[in-house]
Amino acid sequence: MDDVYRLILSTSMSGVIWGANTVVVSLYLLSLHYSPLFIGALFTLSILVSSVEGFIFSILGDLYGRKKFALLSRGLSAVFILLFYLKFVYAYIFMVGWGSGALISAILADKAKNLERVYSYQTSLNIFFSVIGSSLPLYLNYGEIFLLEFAVSITTFSLLLTVREDYKGGGKIKLSSLPTVGKFLPEALIGFGAGLILPLMSLWFKLRFHVTASNISPVFMASELTLALAVIYSSRLSDKLGMVKTIVYTHVLAILLLFVLPFTPTFFEASVVYVLRNALMNMGFGLHRIS
């Protein structure tokens, strides 16, 4: 296995952690008798901290070499996952940050001969592992899931450790790149909202319909699978309507469905609305990636 495939696998396997955590973290905290208000505050703080961590580590990676900070990122995430398993709940604030995904993508960009194909493989594998992560509550309890996440983190660390990086760092920050970074602000805000809402959805389903993690798991599995379908059909719809109109229409419909979601009377109807909402939002995201 060459470096490119090790990098793809190292990044994609983290989808297990994302897929599992969107289902179980809020329910796990609720089982420990923490209030929904505390859980929401913890998630908000996690998003804010991880954004700062990722930004700082990306800068340091450009300055001094990306691999060493990607390894440090993965190592820190593994430590905090283990602490979270041991019921140090504030460890969640630092579990998902540190920007390793962006650092590994930068290493991939330096190594890949056909970057578009590489990102296609990476996206497909990430969806596959995310679906696996979302399915874990069907088979494992909370503690077993977090131990598996720890094992996944160690595995991704080990894969990354074997990769050779030629880039040694630029040694200085280029302020000229800041306008380019600013162009990604709208997508970053969308990501902030998604990162805040999605992990809380399982808590909402639990409180609204009194369902279990194993009931919620198939809904999130279907939601993850919509990303693959959305990427396929978004380009076809864009050919008919145009890219900008397609992004606007799909995002508006997704927002309307999010507004409708609290008024759905049954768990089944809420599940359908939630999956459709994610499909529409992911269609717009897919076009952002293409552009």
Image (cartoon, rainbow, N blue to C red):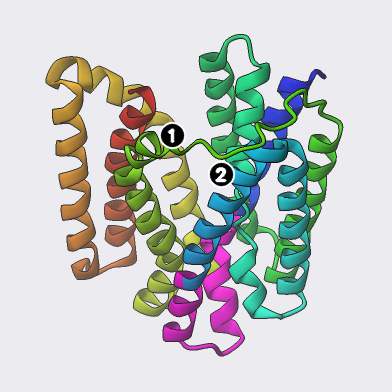
Q: Earlier in the sequence, mark 2 or mark 1?
A: 2
Q: Which residues are magenta?
A: 18-44
Asked which secondary structure carries label 2, the reply is helix
**Residue visible at 24% across and 63% down in the picture:** 261
Q: Which mark is residue 131?
A: 2
Q: Position of residue 32 (x, y in %)?
A: 61, 86
Q: Which mark is residue 177?
A: 1
Q: Position of residue 43 (x, y in %)?
A: 48, 71
**Residue visible at 86% across and 31% down in the picture:** 162
| Residue 85 falls left or right of residue 245 | right
Give the quadrant of the N terminus.
top right
On whether residue 23 falls in the magenta region, the answer is: yes
Determine the main secondary structure of the stretch shown in magenta.
helix
**Residue visible at 17% across and 28% down in the picture:** 244
- Give the answer, above or below, for where 175 lies relative to 239: below
Q: Position of residue 207 (x, y in %)?
A: 39, 79
